Amino acid sequence: MNKYIFLALAGLVSSTGLMAQQRSIPRPSCTTILSEAMFSRKDTVKERGVADNYHTWENGATLKVKFMGGGGGKVLRDKVMMYAKEWEKWGNVKLNFVADNDPKTDIRVKLGQGRGHNSAVGTEAIFRSQEEQTMNFDTIYLADIDYYISKLKQKKNYGPYNVKHIEEEMRLEPNRWAEKELRRVVMHEFGHALGLLHEQSFPGAVKWNKSDSVYNYYLETQGWNRAKVDFNVFEVAEQFYTNGTAYDPKSIMHYSIEPWQTTDGYSLPDNYELSAGDKTLFAALYPKGRKESVNLVPKIQISNFTKLTVTTNATRKGLVIQPAFDLKTNSVLGEVYFVARLATEDGYYVKSNGLFYNWGGSVAAYKKMNLLPNSKVSYNKLKKNLELFLPFEYIPDLKGENVVVEFTVYLNDSKNNQWNKLMYFSNSSPMSLPAR
Ligand SMILES: [Zn+2]
């Protein structure tokens, strides 16, 4: 059975392996917040790439960004803002930092401890609730560790050091930041938030040594399991996502590589600047003086998702599923599917046994929608105009177990041979089905 997405998301974000080491504290690599690309389900597309064109923001957008309440002092916040805004110079998108109590924002930054550095990719941030961060910085790894260790040595503490020692020193003397590393990490994470992906996923770029030693390295330094290493390190993008660019070893979106991690001894240091390639790609995704991206693909934006109503209808003998939201298309039309999948309360999709009401092996009701380019549609707001119906007879006997309905929106771009781009998901509260 397939683990159901909502629970999976909640469980897979954290990434930092805190290890007490002799001299230094390992630095967390960044993870993009994982969506269903993590799971080897037949109906999802796992490819990631250099830029996720389907999840870039609208060209010319001003994105509202806030810090999650309480996290990070003014000094650190000012630095994050300053480095994030370096992207603005190279493309037609603005980051508007607003007050912590702003109720509706596009990007939400948490400055705190644990959970590693990570970010949702572009508009995937829309799937997250307003109460949840879309970007996380593990601030202890941005501190000037060498400085704090020198303070410990002055106190005749010669190690081994752990995170608690550094935290204590940071309390005594805050705001000693590893400036170069801080700037690199902020630009990298905001690169994700604006739709960029890891450059090491460029097809054919890195010949990884997929040995236990590499998996163990990431397990020990990051606490990542094998699936997470596959996703964040080894994943290879389709050529399509390169946007016609050449492999760019100087990209801010590239991990550093040790020679033993590759079969041919290839290695790379950390990159601390936006490369010429980063700037060119960014300018193509968000061109100044043009209405839309140079490499335009079909996209849809879901907003104002207010509720997912699921009712049992005894007369019609089935579940009536009515999500309420607004949908906006761009000028290129793709195929859109609305899918309502059934999951059990403990987190598994309900397996389908038949040909009908079956989406990738799971019990589901779905609809293909024909939408017009450059249009806006409201569903189930002023009038009831979208219903997915799942007959009881297609639901296997769950022996009284409660169910959850997961509503997702997928986009297909047949022209570019790109399928099942996840554009939105939401889930209902647990409910019981009528007894058999
Ligand atoms: Zn990253």
Image: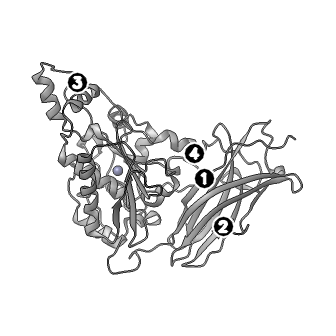
Please tell me the numbered disc located at residue 426. 1
Q: Is residue 314 left or right of residue 182?
A: right
Which of the two residues, 419 or 188, is positioned nearer the viewer here? 188
In the image, residue 44 sits, relative to residue 243, either above or below, namely above
Please tell me the numbered disc located at residue 161. 3
**Residue 434 spot, x, y in % from top left:** 84, 43
Residue, far right: 315
Indicate the amino acid at tag 4. Answer: Phe
**Separation of residues labelled 2 and 4 (CA atoms):** 23 Å
> In the rendered image, which quarter contains the C terminus?
top right
| Comes first in the chain, label 3 or label 2 | 3
**Separation of residues labelled 1 and 4 (CA atoms):** 8 Å
In the image, residue 210 sits, relative to residue 240, either above or below, namely above
**Separation of residues labelled 3 and 2 (CA atoms):** 56 Å
**Separation of residues labelled 3 and 1 (CA atoms):** 43 Å
Indicate the amino acid at tag 3. Answer: Tyr
Which of the two residues, 93 or 181, is positioned nearer the viewer here? 93
